[in-house]
Image: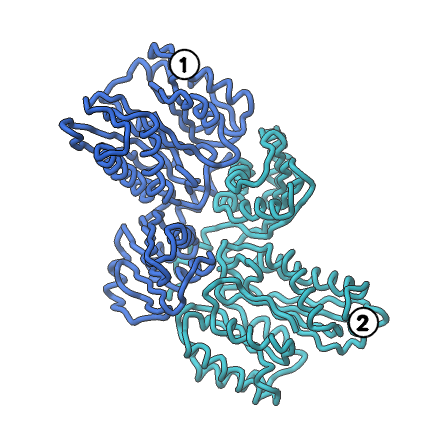
Chain colours: A cyan, B blue
Amino acid sequence: MAAVFTTNTLKAAPILFSQKIIRNKEAQAIVINSGVANACTGQQGLNDCEEMAALTAKGLDIDAGQVLIASTGVIGEYLPMPLLRSGIERACRNLSPENGAKAAQAILTTDTKPKHKAVAFRLQENNCTIGAISKGSGMIQPNMATMISILTTDVAISADLLQKALYQAVNVSYNRLTIDGEMSTNDCVFCLANGLSGNRIINKENQAYDVFLDALNAICLDQTRKLAADGEGATKSISVTVTNARTTGQAEQAARAVANSQLVKTAIYGEDPNWGRVISAIGSTGVDIRPDKLDIWFADIPVAREGAAVPYDTKKLKAALKKKDIKIHASLGTGTEKATIYTCDLTHKYIEINAEYHT
Amino acid sequence: MAAVFTTNTLKAAPILFSQKIIRNKEAQAIVINSGVANACTGQQGLNDCEEMAALTAKGLDIDAGQVLIASTGVIGEYLPMPLLRSGIERACRNLSPENGAKAAQAILTTDTKPKHKAVAFRLQENNCTIGAISKGSGMIQPNMATMISILTTDVAISADLLQKALYQAVNVSYNRLTIDGEMSTNDCVFCLANGLSGNRIINKENQAYDVFLDALNAICLDQTRKLAADGEGATKSISVTVTNARTTGQAEQAARAVANSQLVKTAIYGEDPNWGRVISAIGSTGVDIRPDKLDIWFADIPVAREGAAVPYDTKKLKAALKKKDIKIHASLGTGTEKATIYTCDLTHKYIEINAEYHT
């Protein structure tokens, strides 16, 4: 198994618990609850994790040291253990290969739809698969992962390389997602591999590793885009691509500033190609820019060239901005590197959800 | 005179123009327009500044090298020079000590009310005054100043010490304001001193300097609070104070993260003491925290102690959160330093203003 956790200094109890488990690099089960995050709950929170793991282990006849835990919901409340006890018992009893979609549904909080995906691919002579379920809608800006995402695969791969592949995939997918610039106390991505596909175990970075990584990247990006599209209150998903930056880090920093800009996100909600807000967001980061070389596109239509307005077909652009997927592209003119950040628009519904979501 | 400018890499033409003027440390007039920011306008933007300064100099019979310019409004459009020409001519003709309030009104864009203030104080044997007008409602997160703020005083002080005092005052006032985490291309604070109060010129950091700095701090903080209260769509102003931090920088960083948190700002709009969102925002910064020593107050009422929930009088807290000025206070337990950041809530109206403000 492999895992990536939130880098928030204030980690929830299930994160602290699971971080111990993964030292063994082996796990058999993941138990997830939604509604209460079990964050800021001190020793009792950790005790509750111990009990969740013990109950799951008992129900599945496995070792309690092989159970991972993830929680999502309100911070600062204790878990309602009577509910958890009966829920875990029932979940263990109903465990089946057909119930993945039910799990994807059960872990949601403010999400409006479940997010799952499976990909199949050939590795050596074997048919392999990777499956994923994810949840997350608000409090999302991974500084690593974000939200909860569970990946499973039948590929045979060493734990070290699985961890390496997971880091690589997370860095260009979940870590490039921001709904609202908020890093949760509970974010985690788990990946479990059981080796049942029959491939020769991947234990070096050979061609088989590359094939697996490609598949993993594809599924992580799929989940990332689904999370962006289902961001709290979102009416549109947005991808912000910055090209011709001096370094990948600068491209990412500039793209992230645009993706986190409340003004850019409300402009897209209003279907307005307000490139001034894009330029202002990029300029605020201090990354290397050539103001006289800065080009901006909305939906592949140029709106600014060499740092100044260019005439565009207003009707065509208005029509393009009515779509659900909006591309913003900025070229900085200082190098050759690029990065994309995924986000969504900022809407009345976001305000409604978060002003009314009471503690 | 003294000035502080936006640190946005993409500076508007009036900022670039005024930065040259202040090298002389002497100015006689400031001409301000709202509606068009004259940002991302290349050489034409600079030419328009030259003309604005020349017209103002002509109208007031002063040197064109003594005219500062500030602009606020839409990025990427050229100034409507015919309007500017007649406007400057009329403004020069109507210049009078009684018209300060009209200027405060004229510079507004999305602001709902003018912001001005004057303070009087004794310096040595003299009666002295400082006056201020400010505008700004959105695209506000100073990484220096933010928005436009004009300060005038009759104190006699050297240009170098005036600049030093302005930096000191700006750093604990305008620079601690955030409406939406956005740094404008046009932010600036100007301070002009004409020495007419008759005090012995302040040319070292003596007691008179301290008296002047106190008055300057007071007026800058007043304008900062007025800007926060009139943030786009705001129904409440919020002050976030972080205490017992290891360094002032860490206190400021933590307070800024809370003040920029969309989730905290919507919670305050919803009048909900969601301290979990405060903790999550602080944890995301990586500043030194003792999770078991972290205390949180809303409106001076403790809601979390030692990193966990404490019972509180729900009725009393609900009533406190109905007020217009909301205090959030977090104690990190790792030192003795503190800082306050000023902001406002995030509301439906903010979305409306910024989704409908079309280019």
Q: Which chain hosts label 2?
A: A
Q: Which mark is residue B64?
A: 1
Say which residue appears at 31% left-offset and 71% top-offset: B310
- As measured in the structure, the alpha-carbon distance from the residue carrying label 2 to the one carrying label 1 is 77 Å
Q: How many C-alpha atoms fall within 10 Å of the one at disc 1: few (<14), some, or many (≥20)?
A: many
Residue A326 vertical position relative to residue A37 in the rendered view, above or below = above
> B301 or A286: nearer the eye?
A286
Q: Which mark is residue A127?
A: 2
Q: How many C-alpha atoms fall within 10 Å of the one at disc 2: few (<14), some, or many (≥20)?
A: some
Q: Is residue B332 left or right of residue A142?
A: left
Q: Which chain hosts label 1?
A: B
Residue A77 in picture, x, y percent from top left: 40, 72
Q: Quadrant of residue A113?
A: bottom right
Q: Quadrant of residue B118?
A: top left
Say which residue appears at 66% left-offset and 45% top-offset: A338
Q: Is residue B60 left or right of residue A151?
A: left
**Dot 1: what SS?**
helix
Q: Which mark is residue A248?
A: none
Say which residue appears at 42% left-offset and 42% top-offset: B141
Residue B63 vertical position relative to residue B2 in the rendered view, above or below = above
